[in-house]
Amino acid sequence: MARRTARANLLSEPRGDFIIGEYPLPEPAPGTVLMKIELCGICGTDVHTWHASADAVGCEYPISLGHEISGTVAALGEGVTTDYVGQPLKVGDRIGVCPAIHCHKCYYCTIAKTPEKCTDWKTYGTWPRADQEPHFTGGYGDYLYIHDPNSVFLKTNTSAERTAFLEPMAVVVHSLLHANIKPGDTVVVQGSGPIGLLTIACCKTAGAARLIATGRRNRKRLKLARKIGADLTMCHADMPDPKDRKEFVFDNSLNLVGADIVINTVGTCDGFAECLDFVRNSGTIVEVGNFVDSGTFAFDPCRDLLEKGIRIVGSFDNEAEHFVRSLPLVADARIPLEELITHRVPLGDVQRSLDAVSQGRKLDGKEVVKVMMDPGLPERG
Ligand SMILES: [Zn+2]
Ligand SMILES: [Zn+2]
């Protein structure tokens, strides 16, 4: 009997085209899971991989991109009876998956306890090359084959839409653990892209008393920022002078000394540099945004670090703990995650959508916050 086939949208080469291929569906091996994809969030990180600016990943092309995946269990390999935390699992259950795979053996996994720095780090969405079996290795397709036995997946009782935010939420939770917000804190979230907005949505839950969100020019996003938790927003277009922006933060910080915590989700050098203006003495800056090299700036270790006595932490990617801690956040109906979804597109529209994200322009006449790829949608004629 011929094996059933399904689609995967493969990126042929760096800066190349996305091409939909039809491949035989695998029978899950012992210890693995075949997941039927419901939605996959289109992410700026994919733009970097597409444009080959995220060269640290060292991918072998063609690859199947997409890592913000929600779906249901299509088939369970022998021996898989529960998810990562021991919830019983059966065919049809909705799951979210941690795309990064860590070895649980290296120095970083075991001694340093920072698995996100695993020396054998791999991730669904770029690994392994997708023109060879098992083919279904990324979120831009009909299925994901969770074929590595070290994979982490979690059962959820929330919607497919909310589950698709589990991965970016885990990025946010990781940064919030570094931020260590205390009750009464003033927090500045730099940037109101998807990660910035998710951060804004969670800061109050994490204890922030005053929350200031910043954005360059996209007023729709800043409006959304106020709707999901920001007390105040500051748009660069209205306040082009950095001195005014610093004054705004100081005047609006609860104790008038600047922000206790600044979380930078902007992928620019200038965005990071400005955090140094906003943070109070002995405050904390958490860097999440500069996923690819955006250049350098003048930094004075005496004036900028020692005299201010601040803490600067880089928060890279995520791991199992961040997924487990994110589950209740994505399930919390008080956080209006659905508001972030501006577009739903079929599988064939991945390239067009990434193009719009990359250039910061409208898609189908609408400002983009989050595009979701839905493999169930009919392709445009
Ligand atoms: Zn992402
Ligand atoms: Zn490791």
Image (spheres, rainbow, N blue to C red):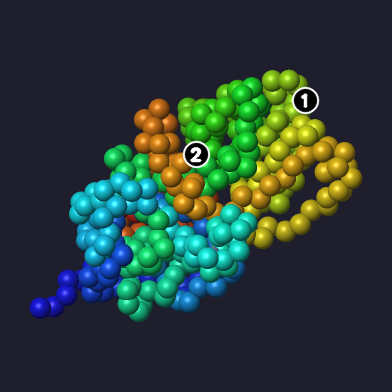
Q: Residue at x 32, y 77 (%)?
A: 133
Residue extending farthest top:
255
Q: Residue at x 57, y 66 (%)?
A: 106
Residue 362 seen anywhere in this rendered image of the structure: no
Q: Amino acid at mark 1?
A: Val
Task: Determine the CA span between mark 2 and mark 1.
Answer: 26 Å
Image quadrant occupied by the C terminus:
bottom left
Q: Residue at x 31, y 64 (%)?
A: 32
Q: 350 or 330: which is nearer to us?
A: 330
Which residue is identified by label 2? 198
Which residue is identified by label 1? 257
Residue 86 seen anywhere in this rendered image of the structure: yes
Q: Amino acid at mark 2?
A: Leu
Horizontal and vertical percent position of residue 148: 38, 67
Q: Is residue 235 left or right of residue 81?
A: right
Against 43, residue 123 (above or below) is below
Against 367, residue 110 (above or below) is below
Q: 28 or 231: which is nearer to us?
A: 28
Q: Is residue 141 left or right of residue 24?
A: right
Against 354, residue 238 (above or below) is above
Against 198, residue 37 (above or below) is below
Q: 224 or 168: which is nearer to us?
A: 168
Sooner in the amino-acid sequence: mark 2 or mark 1 = 2
Horizontal and vertical percent position of residue 51: 54, 66
Q: Is residue 193 left or right of residue 381?
A: right
